[in-house]
Amino acid sequence: MKQFFVALLIFGFIFSCSEENTKLTFIEVNSLKNDNAVIEINIPKANGNSQIAKNINSKIENHIANMLVFLEEDSDTLSLDFAIKSFDTEYASFKEGFTDSALVWDASFDGEVTYQSSSLTSIPITSYINSGGAHGNTNITFFNFDTNGSVIENNDLFLDKDAFIKVAKTYFIEEVKDTNVDQHYIDNFELPANIGFNDEGVILFYNVYEIASYADGFTEFTIPFEEVENFLKIE
């Protein structure tokens, strides 16, 4: 009887951990800072005080912080509050040196949960930063989180990466056939740095300059799950 209750407790613990992940919910957090520079943030935040929620929220905030601060290499310990103050201070210093300039530095960050299953949560973050120059820079980064709230590296998404690439190339060719994408990128097709998910399938996203010029913009397409589900580790 004692062994039965021990087994029951273990089963309950495992079930509660699984349930905690599948019931992870998000709220949208909105903030606007305009003391000097204008910084607007609209991102999803995982609810609760679980380690999973903390891991996800910390990673997203750290990513935004690194986008705001002009470092040669990203820092895993950079805080969002520090980065906001740093960006604002840099702009204030710029204004002191160029008093006649009407340029206002601005940055905006938007995110959403595009896909959530028992094994993965996919969140893209769109970053726009204008700190001078002919135009601002827009970048979209996809984060795929596992059941522990840790980022899943792209290579760890696949059971059979080569088979996935073969299917992806056919969709890529169809997507870029009427664009200015160089033939080199078609002949030497590679997966993008950003791979995400939505309810329809796998999103492949190429940022500006990754395979095309600024004028050509982003390249994005979705491969239906039924085409590639046998090549993926995720559920």
Image (cartoon, rainbow, N blue to C red):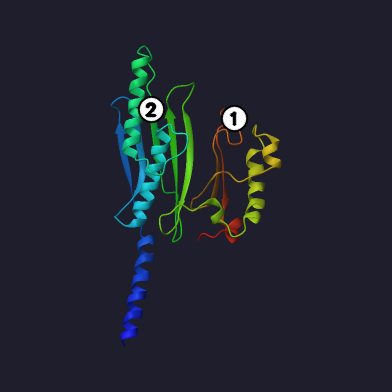
Report if residue 25 is visible in the image: no
* Image quadrant where residue 8 sits: bottom left
Residue furthest toward the top?
100
Q: Nearer the viewer, residue 59 or 216?
A: 59
Report if residue 95 is visible in the image: yes
Horizontal and vertical percent for residue 109?
A: 39, 37
Query: SS for tag 2?
Result: strand
Q: Residue at x 63, y 46 (%)?
A: 171
- Amino acid found under the numbered disc labelled 1: Ser
For disc 1, the marked residue is 213
Q: Nearer the viewer, residue 148 or 221?
A: 148
**Pointer 1: residues within 10 angstroms few (<14), some, or many (20+)?**
some
Side (left or right) of 54 relative to 217: left
- Amino acid found under the numbered disc labelled 2: Asp
Side (left or right) of 216 relative to 35: right
Side (left or right) of 235 relative to 62: right
Q: Residue at x 36, y 25 (%)?
A: 90
* Image quadrant where residue 13 sits: bottom left
For disc 2, the marked residue is 106
**Pointer 2: residues within 10 angstroms few (<14), some, or many (20+)?**
many
